[in-house]
Image (spheres, grey):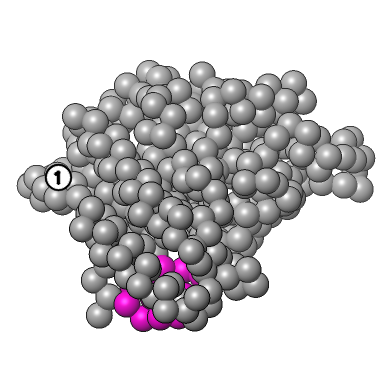
């Protein structure tokens, strides 16, 4: 059984403080569907980052968060422009298109990041009833390729969108890692950057299973209660979802977890730097490391450690670190990479 995983930050367990918060919430009978004190505290903490008028809707998972957030933004004859590597495009089994009835327009990018020029090239047929109408730009922070949008890059996209009556959505499955990488508060990736709706991924940050949709554009708020319920993302025993956010947002646990995960990715990168037969393809900006290895080395290492082959054609692998990754895990992995690669070169 694999005990050390670099496959995904989803492989990590829940942080002890999160589990303790869930246990603490397991007391007595309280109102259901979010009408409880724990949820009220979680919403208060979220608003301390994103603004007092932010609408916060807690949901079960990342795909649900994206579908719920986007459903409040787009109609079925409108489209969502995203990077071709975007999670909504590649890893959600067509859920956005099925449940929204809207078209995804995927764009080839460098490093998984959209730019206004790339979006502009994909936005055409405006006002023509024969074509879907571009309405939403969706970005991922940090991206599926481990890169991080700067605040200036997000603002450029939001300005482009708002000047054309479009909206900006941010898939924040790893928003904590991005904020830690940039050295900013969570809220700086929200309204001040021009984002209209975002998801806050808690699961990858140490939660048991909890995500949030944060609506920052007032006219989109009224639909949220109905959108969440219809999308089957309204928890009856909401206090147990909310308690996880209370734990992560108290005493900056979210930041400590993200900083640690990012630091472990940097340690892993430093450990393989200069090793013949290992080509790290980009400098990690968050908690993902991408590298190219001999396929024989990949097969041997995957017998001992969990990680994904990202691109079969180029023999590129992805190594993810998490809040639970230890220095010992990294050093053990690095040592074994060095041994295996040496034997295959």
Name the spot of residue 20 as percent of width and height, x first.
11, 48
- The residue lying at 51 percent from left, 55 percent from top is 280
In the drawing, does residue 282 fall left or right of residue 107?
Answer: left
To which quarter of the image does residue 193 belong? top right
Magenta stretch: give its range.
298-310
- Along the viewing direction, whichever of 125 and 334 lies nearer the viewer: 334
Magenta stretch holds residue 197: no
Question: Which residue position is annotated with label 1?
Answer: 17
Q: Element type at marker 1?
A: helix
> Which residue is at a point 39% across and 60% down the rendered structure image?
8
Split into 4 quadrants, where in the image is the N terminus? bottom left
Residue nearest the observer in this picture, 145 or 217? 145
Query: Is residue 306 on the magenta stretch?
Result: yes
Query: Residue 43: where, in percent of width, then height?
Result: 31, 31
Is residue 124 something that shows in the picture? yes
Is 145 on the left or on the right of 6, as rendered?
right
Disc 1 crowd, CA 10 A, few/some/many (<14, 14-19, 20+) = some
Q: Quadrant of residue 119?
A: top right
Query: Could you tell me which residue is drawn at 63 percent across and 68 percent down?
Result: 314
* Left or right of 256 on screen, residue 75: right
Residue 138 spot, x, y in % from top left: 62, 41
Does residue 159 sit above or below 254 in this rendering? above
How many badges with numbers are in the image? 1
Q: Position of residue 29 (x, y in %)?
A: 12, 47
Q: Can residue 80 be spotted in the picture? A: no
Q: Residue at x 60, y 73 (%)?
A: 312
**In the figure, is residue 317 to the left or right of 160?**
left
Q: Nearer the viewer, residue 125 or 101?
A: 125
């Amino acid at each position: 059984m694999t005990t050390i995983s670099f496959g995904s930050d989803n492989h990590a367990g829940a942080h002890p403080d999160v589990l303790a918060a869930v246990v603490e919430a397991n007391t007595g009978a309280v109102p259901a569907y979010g009408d409880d004190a724990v949820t009220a505290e979680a919403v208060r903490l979220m608003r301390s980052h994103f603004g007092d008028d932010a609408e916060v809707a807690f949901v079960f998972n990342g795909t649900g968060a994206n579908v719920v957030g986007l459903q409040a933004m787009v109609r079925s004859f409108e489209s969502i422009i995203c990077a071709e590597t975007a999670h909504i495009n590649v890893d959600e089994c067509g859920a956005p298109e099925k449940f929204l009835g809207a078209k995804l327009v995927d764009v080839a990018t460098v490093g998984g990041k959209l730019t206004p020029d790339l979006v502009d090239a994909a936005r055409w047929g405006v006002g023509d009833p024969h074509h879907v109408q571009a309405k939403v730009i969706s970005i991922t922070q940090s991206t599926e390729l481990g890169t991080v949008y700067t605040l200036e890059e997000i603002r450029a996209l939001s300005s482009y969108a708002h000047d054309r009556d479009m909206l900006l959505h941010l898939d924040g499955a790893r928003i904590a890692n991005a904020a830690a990488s940039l050295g900013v508060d969570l809220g700086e990736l929200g309204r001040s950057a021009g984002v209209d709706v975002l998801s806050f991924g808690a699961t990858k940050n140490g939660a048991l299973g909890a995500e949030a949709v944060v609506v920052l554009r007032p006219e989109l708020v009224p639909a949220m209660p109905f959108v969440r319920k219809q999308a089957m993302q309204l928890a009856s025993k909401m206090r147990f979802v909310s308690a996880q956010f209370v734990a992560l947002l108290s005493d900056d646990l979210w930041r400590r977890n993200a900083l640690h995960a990012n630091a472990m990715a940097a340690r892993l990168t430093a450990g393989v730097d200069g090793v013949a037969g290992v080509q790290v393809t980009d400098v990690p900006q968050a908690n993902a490391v991408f590298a190219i290895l001999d396929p024989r080395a990949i097969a041997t290492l995957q017998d001992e450690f969990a990680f994904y082959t990202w691109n079969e054609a180029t023999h590129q692998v992805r190594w993810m670190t998490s809040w639970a990754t230890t220095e010992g895990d990294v050093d053990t992995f690095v040592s074994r990479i060095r041994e295996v690669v040496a034997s295959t070169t």
